[in-house]
Amino acid sequence: MNDSVSEATAGEETADAVVGAEDDPAAPAPLNVARTATGHPDVDAALDRLADADHLATDGHVEVYEEAHRGLRDALTALDTRPGPPAPSRHPSPGAE
């Protein structure tokens, strides 16, 4: 008899939680913002990470945003460290006049 009572109670609590989540303005609500691939794997990974915020309550967004920001900042920093062609000299070579 206890099993049937506890099963009924558990079912009611689950139904209440589902109804409560729909009525709760602080409940996670996906923004469904389309993300277009940039072609840069590090940038795309950081932007894809933002999708995780759709499934979190607002108090969990900060961690996701900070991680995405770090990823984007690291991708920009990497652009500065890539070897490229040598910069042109500002001073003319001796005898070049």
Image (spheres, rainbow, N blue to C red):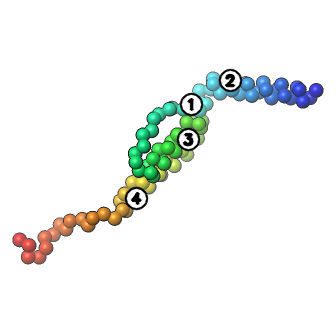
Q: Which mark is residue 29?
A: 1
Q: Residues within 10 Å of mark 4 (few under 14, many from 20)?
A: few
Residue that label 4 marks: 78
Chain-order first, disc 2 or disc 4: 2
Q: Is residue 85 visible?
A: yes
**How far apart, in angstroms, are the residues tagged by discs 3 and 1?**
11 Å
Q: Earlier in the sequence, mark 2 or mark 3?
A: 2
Identify the residue shown where x is 89% and y is 26%: 4
The residue wearing badge 3 is 52
Tell me if 86 is positioned left or right of 1 in this view. Answer: left
Q: Which residue is mark 2?
A: 19
Q: Is residue 14 left or right of residue 70?
A: right
Residue shown at the point (37%, 57%) measured from the top left: 79
Q: Earlier in the sequence, mark 4 or mark 3?
A: 3
The residue that appears at 42% across and 40% down in the rendered structure is 36
Q: Residues within 10 Å of mark 1 (few under 14, many from 20)?
A: some
Identify which amino acid the numbered label 4 is placed on: Ala
